[in-house]
Structure formats: structure tokens, C-alpha cells
Amino acid sequence: MSDLGKSMSRRDLLRDAGAVLALSVLDAPVLPQVRADTTLPPDPARSENEATRFRGKWHGEQCYFGFHHDLHVIKSDRHIGAECDPKQLAQMLKLTGADFVQTDSKGHPGLTSWFSKTPGASVGPGVVKDWVLAWREATKELGLPLHCHYSGVFDISAGAKHPEWCIVGPDGKPVRREFEGMASTGGSTMCPRGPYVDELMIPQLLELIDRYDINGFWVDGDSWATTPCYCDRCRAAFKSKTGIAEPPKTPNDPHWAEWWNFTREGFEQYVARYCDAVHRHKPGVLVCSNWLQTLRNPGEPKVPTDWISGDNTPVWGVDDSRCEARFISTRGKPWDIMLWCFYTSRGGHGFAVDWVMKPVQMLQQEAAVILAMGGNVQTCENPFTGTRNGRLVPWRLKRIGELARFVKSRRDLCQGADSIPQVAVLHSEHHAYSAPGGRDLIGSIDVTPIRGAVSSLLECHYGVDILDEWALLPRLARFPIVVVSEKERMSEKMVDAFMKYVSAGGRLLVAGTAVFDRFGDKFFGIKGSRVAPGNYYLPAADGVVPLSTTWRLVETAEAKGLGTLGTTVFRDEQLLPNPAATLHRVGSGAVAYIPCDIFREFAANRYPLVRTFIHDVLRALAGKMEIEVDAPTCVDVVLRRKDAKRMVHLINRASGIPNLPNSPVIDEIPPVGPVTMTMSLPRKPKNVSLAFEEATLRWGYASGQNAQQLKIEVAAVHIHAAVVVEEDV
Ligand SMILES: [Zn+2]
């Protein structure tokens, strides 16, 4: 970490010709801190709304770790269910330590693994024994809830039988997706406005409930398989809503955002329809639509699913989950993330890939970033090769059992804890939905600047939450720092709220070339600027780092410049007259501005000096935080509170086996440390301890005129430990 700004004056810096970073112009923090010692209570102003909003349901606290088994029956399968013996299956499931179980009922090919009697059902031709029945009997014996994996919008068999049910592409032909060599000439994704949901999907879900007493549905192939539909039904509905007779064909055409959002709303109505049908038929049966209400689906979570879940990428899962968990945890619903317990080094997808079971430590590291944020965890077992008959693989299940023990040992402290607000990263739904960049409902949302912001802030050991406008507006004042990462299309209401937030003492970091215009010169204390792409160098620590992108070259008025932008790799040559960032005190607070898309750049380059620069700007903006952690860069911090306990979770993202482009494996994780932290506390705590792992912990409390501070040192963290500070109540 940089120690710039601790002792040098601006004059010293300028005299030291190479030292172009001028963060030290700021004195030690003088601005009043927004109080950060409260968790996130519901907003009283919204209590009525909160009361009427569907907040989902779950089986109970004891259901914490889940085992999911994919299948996706295809036409060439020959022995589906042949080895499904409930007694043996129960023995196998015991090895996993699962609290709830999910198994196949219908995959993307649209073929059931059971003998569905719903008219129009497509039963897999190779089903020799009822798969769902065996899993139901086994889970009943173990007293575990059973969910069915059911492919929603993506159904190749229904598309073959009913081309008129299908999503029609801009070329007027049904949209075709293949799966393991199976494709339909008629189309393979279902129009959310078509008869599919009423004539096949809902009857089949209800049949599963009635025949097998199924406890829930994890609907896959849903939002990510949905694209705009140009069928007559959808065209007519769009025209009636907007008056636009001819929907746009590409994201570059006029009215694309209206058309794409119309698609999103149609999809949401379709999900609400099957949720309502299931809930009406048997209250207590839970429904989830894979990836709905996650990072790429911001905004008020109105669709009445019971819980939120998504299956993580098979590799680099920690990085994805760091963002997903920080957003999903603000939705107000039960949630989990599903870890693939297998990966491949060669890329690709499907049955023919050389999938291999992950080392247990890799799974534990992936689980830790979810658990620390309060989520449940489930893991997906690979049924793709060698086990199509229903036989499970004991050695892999034992690894999952080891993961289960790791997960469950964390339940008491992780489950039900709340965030201690420190840094909020804005994920504006208005920004996201005003310019969707593609066709499908998940892949069209650009979250790159959010990923850049979160990963850089975590590398600086801040506690970070991601909130959309819906979640942030009522809680804004509780966050000492808010980061706006290149969100130029946020709502006017959000801009106004930020201005008031800063006046009242908040610290706002705004980054981005275009977002400048949403606030204007006066707010930033700037008297002029021009936008100019080029090869620029950013000063940080002992060097400079290239950020060749479009910068806004600003001239300061009341604002102070933080560092000087350069044009060469030398720290003292051909410097521009423009600052690399600015800081402006407004009312009781302050706003810092980084005039380029620095978080998008960081998401792509992860240059350590870029992170150092961001950290220096934040320190200049906000001064000392109530909780500060100094740790190796690979350690993520999560700040949580439960009852009288404050927790500082420490998650080690390192791998003992260095990663390469063709080797994403994490194993032999080396313990890292020491980790030191300070916490402002009004009284000496009752106890300070380390949870989950064994390591030396030392602490001391100093009570003086200027500070009442707890200091803690933890010798090392292996995968996931938590410092627990217990206060007297
Ligand atoms: Zn349609």
C-alpha cells in the first residue's frame, strides 16, 4: 500500500520533480464522518411498500447447504434411471451432507426423466426407471426437501412439436438453440406470451407437486435464454403499449431499449404466472428462476419468486461471486449461489468436455465469498459422462461432504448477519436498462465498471456492498462512502440524492468521462474541461501506469487536484496541466472525481498501480474509516454485524498453484498474513476472538482523548476466518 500523503506537503511533492501525486494537499481528515455503525434496517418511509412486497420464503435456517444434480436428458440416452435405487441413493446423498437436494425433471432438450402424463409432454426415450420418484423416495427417507431442476423458456422438444409457441427472431424464423447435438427445426425457446406456460409448463410443475410432493423448483434456461420475440402476439402487444408498429431488429436501431425492456417485462410476467400457479396450487412449494434478480437484473425485485439463485461459472468463480453476493444480499430475499463442483482447463461446454472435480480448497474458497455475505451455498454435480444411468460417484460426493462441513461450521455466525455499511457501489437500474447492449436478458447488461470498482475496492480492504437505486436511495446516508462507477444514465432522483448526501457529510467518488455532465462544473469545483482520447499515464506510488482511454482534461476552480496526468512513462516529463483526479468539499462532505472510466479499465487490466491510485483518492476523500484493515492484497474483507457481534471476515483468494490462462485451479492455498486492523469503539469490547480457523490473535484497546480504538492483529488467514468483536449490551 502507498504511504503517499502521510507526511509530504504539496510543495514538497512538486519540488520532488518526479512526485506528481498530490494527495497530501489534504490535511488529516477534518470532515465529520457519516455514522457507519448501524446495519441496514428497513426504511420506515417505505414500510408500507415493504409490507406488501413479496419477500420470498425458505425452508428454514437449517437448510443451508444444497446438492444439485443436473441431467439434461437427451435423445441418445439409453439407461436413464437404471441405477436409481432409493436406498443406495440415500446412502450416497448422506455423503454430501446436503440440507436440501435438487434433481432433474426436465432439461434444456425438454425431455423428462420421469413418465410425465401431462398432455404434450416429451418423455426421454431412454428413461427406463422413474428418476424423480427414486430421488423423492431417497430424500423423504433422509427428511430433506427436494427441488426439481426444470428448464423453462429453453425447451427443444416443445419447440419441435409447437413451432407456434416459439420465440421468433428478427428474421421471422423461430430462434434455434442447440444442446448436445439436439436441435429443433421448429425453434427451441418459448415465447413468454405463448401457450407454453399454460399448456405445458404449469401443468407439468403441478403434476410434479401432486405426484411426488416436490418442495420447490429451480427453473433453469429462463432469463438467459430469453431474447426479443417478433411473433404476432409480441408485435401486437408492443404496438399497443408503445404505438411502435415495427420493432427494432438490432441494438443499434431506434427504440431498442423500449423493445428490450418490453421483452424483460414480458419475461417477468411469465415468471410471475408460474410462481402464482405453483403458490396457489400448494402454498409452501418454493420457486426460483435461475439468475433472476441477480447482478444483471437490477431494480425492485417484484417478481414473486421465493428465493434467488444462480449457477456460477465453472472457473474464476470467486471473482464472479464477489460481485453477485454483494448485490443479491441487498434484495431482501433468501438466496444462494450454486457452485459447479467441476471445471475444465480446455474451455468448452457440454458432455464431451474433460470435466474434472475441483479440489476441496477451491470449492471452500468459492463458498467463503458467499457465506460471508450471508448467502446459502449449493453445489452442482456433473452427470455428463459415465453416470447417465443415475449412479453417483462416491469419491466426488465425499469431497462435497467436506465442503458441507466447511459451510455448516460457519452457519451460526454468517447466517442472518447484516452488513456494516462502509462503501456502497451504485448499480443503477436506470443506467443498466436504458442502453442494453445485446439480446438476451442477462448477457445484455454491462456490469464491467461495477466489477472494476468492487475488485479494486476489495483489494484496498474496504467493506463493499452493491446497491441499485431502489436499495440505495432509502439507505444512502448510512454509507460513509458511495462510489459511482461510470453511471451516466442514472436517474435524476439519484443525482439529486447524491448532491444532498454530500452536503450532509457524505463522501462521494464519481468516476467516468461522461458522468461528469450529470453533476456539472460547480459540484465538482471545476471551471472547465474537455474530453480527449489519448495515451495517458497515471501517477501512483513510485511509478506511473498507462491508462490509454478517453479522459476528461479538467481545470480546477475550488477543487484540489490529486496527482498530475502525464503523457510518458517518466514521472517528471511532459506532464499535463490537468489533475488525475479532483477533490471538492461541498457542505459538510466532499466529492472526488476521477475523470476517466477507470473502473472499466481496472476490470480489464487489474494493474496494481491503478488500484493504488484509487486507494489514495479514497483516503484523500474519506480519511480514516471506523474499521480499517491492513492485509495482503489477496485478502477480501467483509464487514458484518449480528446481535452484539461485529465481524471482520477475512477471505484469502490466493492459490498455492499459480494460475495460468489454461490452469484456473486453486489448491494448496498458502496461509497469508499478518492482518492488522483498527476499529473505533466507544468502549472496550467484552471479547475479541477468531472464528473458523486457528491462528494467533492479539488485541488491545486504547482509550484516549482523540481516539477510542481497538487494534487487532491476526497472524495468518488460510481460507476464511472472521474476527469477532463482542460488545457488552
Ligand atoms: Zn412472442
Image: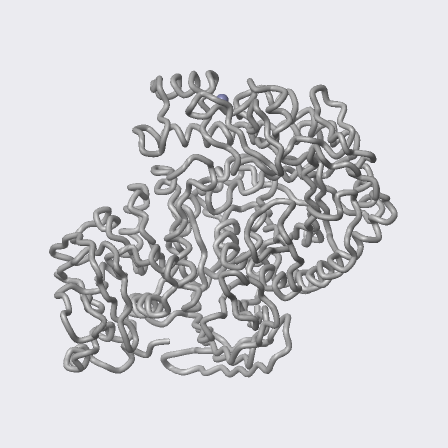
- Residue 714: x and y in percent read 54, 79
- Residue 468: x and y in percent read 42, 46
| Frontmost residue, 573 versus 386 | 386
Quadrant of the rendering where the N terminus is positioned = bottom left
Which residue is found at the position 61% from the left and 79% from the top?
Answer: 695
Viewed as shown, does residue 61 lie left or right of 334? Answer: right
Q: Looking at the image, which residue sits at the far right?
A: 87
- Residue 52: x and y in percent read 53, 35
User: Relative to residue 69, is residue 109 depicted above or below?
Assistant: above
How many numbered callouts? 0
Q: Quadrant of residue 445?
A: top left
Looking at the picture, the colour scheme in use is: one colour
From this viewpoint, is residue 316 visible?
yes
User: Relative to residue 94, is residue 698 depicted above or below?
Assistant: below
From this viewpoint, is residue 32 visible?
no
User: Relative to residue 74, is residue 382 depicted above or below?
Assistant: below
- Residue 614: x and y in percent read 32, 65
Which residue is found at the position 63% from the left and 61% from the top?
Answer: 363
Quadrant of the rendering where the C terminus is positioned = bottom right
| Frontmost residue, 727 versus 189 | 189
Q: Quadrant of residue 626?
A: bottom left
Which residue is found at the position 52% from the left and 61% from the top?
Answer: 662
User: Relative to residue 597, is residue 621 depicted above or below?
Assistant: below
